[in-house]
Amino acid sequence: MAYSTDLQDFNLFLLRVFEGIAFTELDYQHIRSWLADLKENKLTARSINRKISTLKSFLNTI
């Protein structure tokens, strides 16, 4: 459940900030922006690390 929620949250961030850039067009700046947004929203380090792990796993499949 957390896996799909994390991916949905990332996708919503991309829609909001980058007008829905495709996953295949991502670069480190997009991901760093997302991480900064998570930190600004006061997520714990543990939650951020889980989201990073989720995104890594997903990106390794495409």
Image (tube, rainbow, N blue to C red):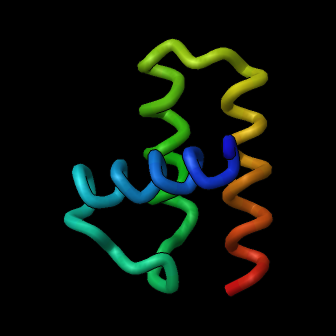
Q: Position of residue 3 (x, y in %)?
A: 69, 51
- On-image quarter of the C terminus: bottom right
| Quarter of the figure with residue 50 | top right
At a point 26% along the width and 59% down the height, the residue shown is 15
At a point 51% along the width and 85% down the height, the residue shown is 24
Horizontally, is 58 left or right of 42 in the view? Answer: right
**Between 35 and 5, which is closer to the camera in this rendering?**
5
How many numbered marks appear?
A: 0
Q: Position of residue 51 (x, y in %)?
A: 67, 42
Horizontally, is 53 left or right of 55 in the view? Answer: right
At a point 67% along the width and 58% down the height, the residue shown is 55
The image shows residue 47, relative to residue 43, as above or below, that is below
- On-image quarter of the N terminus: top right
| Quarter of the figure with residue 21 | bottom left
The image shows residue 54, relative to residue 41, as above or below, that is below
At a point 25% along the width and 52% down the height, the residue shown is 17
**Between 36 and 38, which is closer to the camera in this rendering?**
38
| Quarter of the figure with residue 18 | bottom left
Horizontally, is 9 left or right of 4 in the view? Answer: left
The image shows residue 36, relative to residue 57, as above or below, that is above
**Between 25 and 15, which is closer to the camera in this rendering?**
15
The image shows residue 58, relative to residue 1, as above or below, that is below
Horizontally, is 5 left or right of 45 in the view? Answer: left
**Between 12 and 42, which is closer to the camera in this rendering?**
12
Furthest toward the front, the residue is: 1
